[in-house]
Image (cartoon, helix red, strand yellow):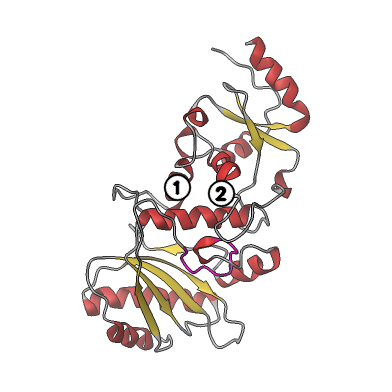
Amino acid sequence: MSVRKPGVVDPQLQQAEAGEGGGPSSLALYRESVATQEGPKREGRCPRKAGYLMLNLVTGECFPARCKANFCPWCGPLNASLIGGAIALARPDRAILLTDVGNEWQVARNRAKQFAHHVKRRLGIPFDWCWHLEPNPKDTGHHMHGWQRGEKFLPQRALSEVARSVGMGPVVFVNRVKTKPGEAIGYGMKLAGVAYGLKLTEAEATMKVYLEANGNRLVHASRGFWRGEDGKAFSGQREAMSAWASRNRSASDDQGEWVLVREEQLAEARSALVRS
């Protein structure tokens, strides 16, 4: 069936809205994830895409478009929710807290790299993990929250020695993560305001603080950390987030092509679909 695409705007904007595998990851978010595990359903929509909708050229279904930017007050918390789900899919075995990692982003980032490197080389422990920084309001050095996957036991005293050797604080906490298959749990990103510990990202002001501390990203991961429920490695964070979103998509979401249209053009666009 040949369908005209009335009202379609910049193809790059259209592509930015598409999810992996042809279906829009945004749709699952608007159906399910806007209600977080720590609060009521969020009202409103993305202010940077106000007046735009995503339209399915086969089913005629539509939903509000979003920019997907981390700094967006609407999209940032939704991104955090997707990342939390992606972490759940990776099934980490341990939660790790590193203290006094430094107040400057580049300093903390380099120490995180050195820490993981020395755990692998000096302790001989495989170390796939993801992590983020939690700004410390007392200005005594940010904390680092991490989630690590691996069968080998992590000796807390040895980790503390490694942390101290790379310039971090000597206090390290390691806790086992217990989850049921497919269950998303809280991961300590307390600045995002949603489950999975990104609480600072809930409000626009605190999101700015969080992103500045984390090099404008919500989370950082070692190569190979992101995995699916079957244990197969994802190509990266984006694929992992999309896989989590797809759990809530219906079969109809993957039918047809999704395009970006202006709200005032919706009636015309749907009329064109009927005539086709």
Q: For the C terminus, give its image quadrant.
A: top right
Residue 138 shown in magenta: no
Question: Mark 2 or mark 1, which is nearer the start of the sequence?
Answer: 2
Give the magenta part as a residue range. 186-194
> What x and y, as percent, mark residue 19?
51, 39
Under circle 2, the secondary element is helix
What residue appears at the point 42 percent right and 87 percent down from the top-left corner? Answer: 167
Mark 2 surroundings within 10 Å by alpha-carbon count, few (fewer than 14), some (14 through 19), many (20 or more): many
Distance in Å between CA atoms under marks 1 and 2: 11 Å
Relative to 27, residue 134 above or below: below
Residue situated in front as seen by the camera: 99 or 93? 93
In the rendered image, the vertical position of residue 125 relative to residue 59, given as above or below? below
Residue beneath disc 2: 33
Find residue 232 and report its horizontal and vertical position in percent.
Answer: 29, 48
Q: Nearer the viewer, residue 113 or 48?
A: 48
Residue located at (55% from left, 70% from top): 190
